[in-house]
Structures are given as C-alpha cells and as structure tokens.
Image (cartoon, rainbow, N blue to C red):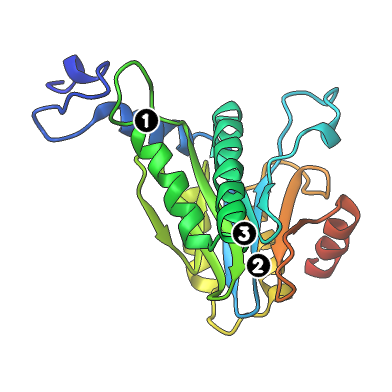
Amino acid sequence: MGDSQYSFSLTTFSPSGKLVQIEHALTAVGSGQTSLGIKAANGVVIATEKKLPSILVDETSVQKIQCLTPNIGVVYSGMGPDFRVLVRKSRKQAEQYHRLYKEPIPVTQLVRETAAVMQEFTQSGGVRPFGVSLLVAGFDDSGPQLYQVDPSGSYFSWKASAMGKNVSNAKTFLEKRYTDDMELDDAVHTAILTLKEGFEGQISGKNIEIGIIGTDKKFRVLTPAEIDDYLAEVE
C-alpha cells in the first residue's frame, strides 16, 4: 500500500521507483480489445477485434486500423479517443518530414517521433499518459517492419506481438506458430487463428479488422468481403 499516496501524481516516483500512473495506463491497455501484428518475409499484417457497444452501431463508421502514411499503418488497444490524438500528431510529423526531404518518412523515425510524444505525456504536469499501446506496421527501404509503442514511450521492433485483453494466450499462440520464412498470406491466416483463440462469439468480417502491407509498399485495410474469404480459407 506504500505506493498509494503517489498514485495520483504523474510526475512523482514512488519509493519503489515506479511511476504508478504509467502502470495504470498499461492496465487500461490490458483491458482493451485484443490487437496483434505479424511480420512476414514479404510484408506485415496487423489485426484487431472490433466489438461494438451495441448492435445498433453502424460498424462501417468504426475504423480501428488507420493509415499514417501510404506505406505505414497503425492499430491500437486501449482508449479510442487517445488513439485519435496520436494518429493526428503522427500524420503531421510524417507530412513535415515529407515536405522537408521530399521522400516518405522511414518507419523507425515515425515510431520514434510518436514514442517521443507519448514520453512527453509521462513527464509534464497537468496531463495524463496516453491509455493506448500501438502496433505500427510499415514497409520501407529496410523491408517490412513491426513496432509496438507503449504509454511509457518505450518502443521495440517485433517479429510478432499482441496486446489487449487476451495478450498472454495470443503471444503463446504466436510463439508456437511463427516462422521466419512465413509468407504474407500465411501471416494473415495465423493472425485470424490467433484472434479466434480468445474470441467471444462468432468471428466474421464485420467484427474484426485486418490491415496488410506487402512488397508494393501500399498499406491497406481489408474489406469485410476479403476478410470473409480469408476466414473461409482458415476453416
């Protein structure tokens, strides 16, 4: 209980050396919907559950996977509104780079800039950390890349990663299924199977979202019809 008196201050370390608010932000991510990403030999796939609060919500109006640049896409677990803020800032950063250097921003650099924004919000007074973790998928001159960024501002490059509700099962499943020479189509199948593991109810093209980027370096979100085709292949 010693840390509890520090749990409301963002910028004060507790005696055990923790910033408690960041841990709470990670808890918010952990109770969000499952998202995952897989880096294949020739591309990257990111996928997420899209559970809506009510059947009356128009599912076409909810987009959890967003484009940051034509060759970089991102998905989140955690709080949707916080995600929108980060998407806006990241797009702006990418555009500034493009205007200055007349070429698309490298994935690593965009991830670093986004992580810097998230870190800023762990060290300023009067703000709270972002309640989201991001999976950023891109394809640039260094090939396919997948990064995860956490509310603390730390980021790592992954071969395959998961976050959100069912994270431990999803990661175990990915560890078993992942191979370095996996093709993009196999990666999509594996992503679907991993989501299916902890999925409550019937999985369909309407309640999951998948984004892919291949050697053409164009990131795109699959349509529900395409997802249904992949689902048929998996079953």
Which disc, if any, is residue 190? Answer: 2
Could you tell which of marks 3 and 1 lies nearer the N-terminus? 1
Name the outermost residue toward the right. Answer: 225
Q: How many marks?
A: 3
Residue 152 lies in what quarter of the image? top left
Amino acid at pointer 1: Phe
Callout 1 crowding tier (Cα within 10 Å): few <14, some 14–19, many ≥20:
many
Whole-number angstrom distance, CA of label 1 to CA of label 2: 35 Å
Give the residue drawn at x 59%, y 26%.
81
* Rendered location of residue 120, percent (x, y): 35, 34
Pointer 2 with pointer 3, Cβ within 8 A: yes
Give the residue drawn at x 11%, y 33%.
16
Look at mark 1 in the image and give the residue it sits on.
Answer: 121
Q: Secondary structure at mark 2?
A: helix
Which disc, if any, is residue 194? Answer: 3
Amino acid at pointer 2: Thr
Name the outermost residue toward the bottom. Answer: 181
Could you tell which of marks 1 and 2 lies nearer the N-terminus? 1
* Rendered location of residue 131, percent (x, y): 46, 31
